[in-house]
Image (tube, rainbow, N blue to C red):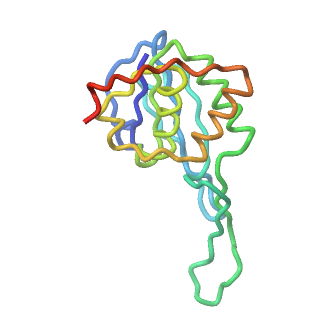
Amino acid sequence: MKCYNLSRKEAKQNTTELPPSVNAWISIMEPDGKDFVRSHIENEFLDKCPNLKLKFWDTTHRAAFIGSSFEETEATEYADPISDEQLEELYAFIMAHKDKNIYVNCAAGKCRSGAICQFCQDMLQFEWPDQFKNRAVPNSYVYKKLIELFFRNGGTPPTIIHDRRRIK
């Protein structure tokens, strides 16, 4: 199976017919703010596949938003990383669809989606094509939490044989 990290724009513009029997989609957005609501992207091709749509920030710890006015010194909103509930939902979805190609999109297709693809490659032996892997900067918190869940649920890592001929 393969895993692909896509940007929001790439996911929105996808026009490839993907058979739902062998493909799944995870879409990640930033949460709604106090003054706005963000909608998940819709894509007629990806929406036919089993899908999970989550909202969480690309952060590794709770971060405060300080208002736009110079007078504001107190945090008016907070950006939180993925919650434990969302993490459980994400892990269950991945495990339920580990026999399928998984498409994952977030804003830039680098951090949150990169962490999920890295987990799928490292623990579930998914193929992660270089053109997607090379642009990823996986979110360390999401990756670490997925690994913890994997081991907590009795997962065993694959045996990795290093081929010295590939080391430059």
The picture places residue 73, in percent across and down from the top left corner, at 67, 84
Pick the residue in front: 10 or 2: 2
Residue 58 is situated, as x and y percent measured from the top left of the image, at 55, 52
Q: Is residue 115 above or below residue 89?
A: below
Farthest-out residue, front = 164
x%, y% of residue 143? 57, 39
- In depth, the one of 62 and 141 nearer the eye is 141
* Residue under the image location 53 percent in, 18 percent down: 158
Question: For residue 75, which quarter of the picture?
Answer: bottom right
Tell me residue 141's x, y (percent): 60, 47
Give the residue at the far top of this rendering: 21
Judge by depth and name the residue closer to the eye, 134 or 7: 134
Q: Quadrant of the C terminus?
A: top left
Relative placement, left or right, of 152 versus 52 is right
Number of marks in picture: 0
Q: Relative to 147, does residue 2 appear above or below in the rendering? A: above
Q: Quadrant of residue 55?
A: top right
The residue positioned 65% from the left and 69% from the top of the image is 64
Viewed as shown, does residue 64 lie left or right of 9? right
State the residue at coordinates (66%, 27%). Answer: 150
Q: Quadrant of residue 94?
A: top right
The quarter in which the N terminus is drawn is top left
Residue appearing at x 59%, y 60% in the figure: 36
